[in-house]
């Protein structure tokens, strides 16, 4: 027995989601077939609504609703001279949770990774350069992920931003708070040493 | 920043799927927001179609389309005196792949687990007993999973089926083919020893 085309289509579509392998796709498909119709349709509706209502902020490319600017760009209390560059909208949520940042954001919508087909043109770099020139930005904090792609993106941004005379900074890498030296990998510990700062000053 | 209600609803609905934690739900939601609308809507459509078209076979509770019997029950070449009892429809696919079974199936739609609210009445046991009585079944092969719930279900089925005078068998547990004694857990190895059979006869 193989699955009917309807079931196979559902499994295929679920399998295209990130992090969902063929086995999970199958399990989720059967779950959806088994739950009450209303529950399954609620998910279908949520997808349709999200695609209808949610757009990207024309300034920073964060998520926005109704086609206008996002809540952060529209907030006049946010510092405009400070821009934090992140890879994705969900990174904004993480930075906002710290309560440490009162500037604005710029979402690149990815990280530089030519092998995956993400080059300079796929990222919102041109738009960032325009903002820096137009909006009197003083400092760009590069908060891309501290992995291969994120670091390559950071290096790229420095090359583009420096000529504009703006200050470019990078978030610190090091041991996580509550972490343990013994279990830290050598790269992280190396970065922690490199980024050491003086105490008692 | 927290998510807008539309985005949060999408994350919530995704998070209700089995095996999808809050982080995965968030990642999938952002993936859906980023991909072309057509790609996202294809998933929504697949869900709606599956719920519209797919039903359960009135005889064995396998998946079926169009409200009738499933492809296996409708196939006159399948042996009717042999019924293989499984927990879910996807288990049928696994058994069919072996090419070793020419009988019919009965899908319990779960395994006995009172702690999760799955008692005798939540499983298709009553329907199995009716089939055994009505369809002249000679042997019921219990192919529930060899875990706690599956074994409890098997024990339960024996209790209900034996009085009907039908032969009840259980699939063998033991080392997987290509497996390694050294890495086998003690329960599996214990089962393998228990289920040993004579060679050279």
Image: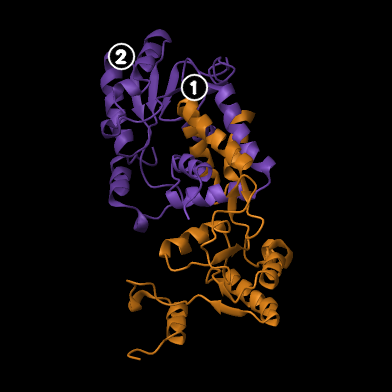
Chain colours: A orange, B purple
Between residues B117 and A151, which one lies in front from this camera angle? A151
- Residue reaching furthest to the right: A121
Q: Tell me if residue A98 comes above or below residue A183 in the rendering.
A: above
* Residue plotted at (57% across, 17% down): B77
Question: Residue B8: percent from the left, percent from the top?
Answer: 48, 45
Pointer 2 residue: B165
* Mark 2 residue crowding within 10 angstroms, few (<14) / some (14–19) / many (20+): few
Residue A190 visible to the viewer: yes
Pointer 1 residue: B103
Report whether B7 appears left or right of B162.
Answer: right
- Mark identifier at residue A201: none
Q: Tell me if residue A25 comes above or below residue A107 in the rendering.
A: above
Residue A20 visible to the viewer: no
Q: Tell me if residue A175 comes above or below residue A26 in the rendering.
A: below
Question: Residue B17: percent from the left, percent from the top?
Answer: 46, 40
Report whether B136 appears left or right of B6.
Answer: left
Labels 1 and 2: the sequence-earlier one: 1
Determine the secondary structure under disc 1: loop
């Amino acid at each position: 027995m193989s699955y009917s085309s309807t079931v196979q289509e559902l499994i295929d579509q679920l399998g295209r989601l990130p992090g969902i392998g063929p086995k999970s796709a199958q399990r989720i498909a059967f779950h959806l077939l088994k739950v009450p119709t209303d529950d399954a349709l609620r998910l279908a509706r949520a997808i349709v609504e999200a695609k209808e209502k949610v757009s990207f902020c024309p300034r920073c490319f964060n998520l926005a609703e109704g086609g206008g600017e996002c809540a952060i760009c529209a907030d006049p209390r946010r510092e405009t001279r400070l821009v934090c560059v992140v890879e994705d909208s969900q990174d904004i949520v993480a930075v906002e949770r710290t309560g440490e940042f009162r500037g604005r954001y710029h979402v690149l919508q990815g990280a530089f990774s030519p092998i995956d087909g993400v080059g300079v043109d796929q990222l919102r770099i041109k738009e960032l350069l325009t903002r820096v020139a137009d909006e009197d930005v003083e400092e760009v904090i590069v908060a891309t992920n501290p992995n291969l792609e994120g670091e390559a993106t950071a290096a790229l941004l420095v090359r583009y931003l420096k000529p504009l005379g703006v200050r470019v900074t990078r978030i610190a890498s090091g041991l996580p708070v509550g972490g343990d030296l013994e279990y830290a990998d050598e790269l992280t510990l190396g970065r922690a040493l490199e980024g050491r700062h003086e105490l008692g000053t």
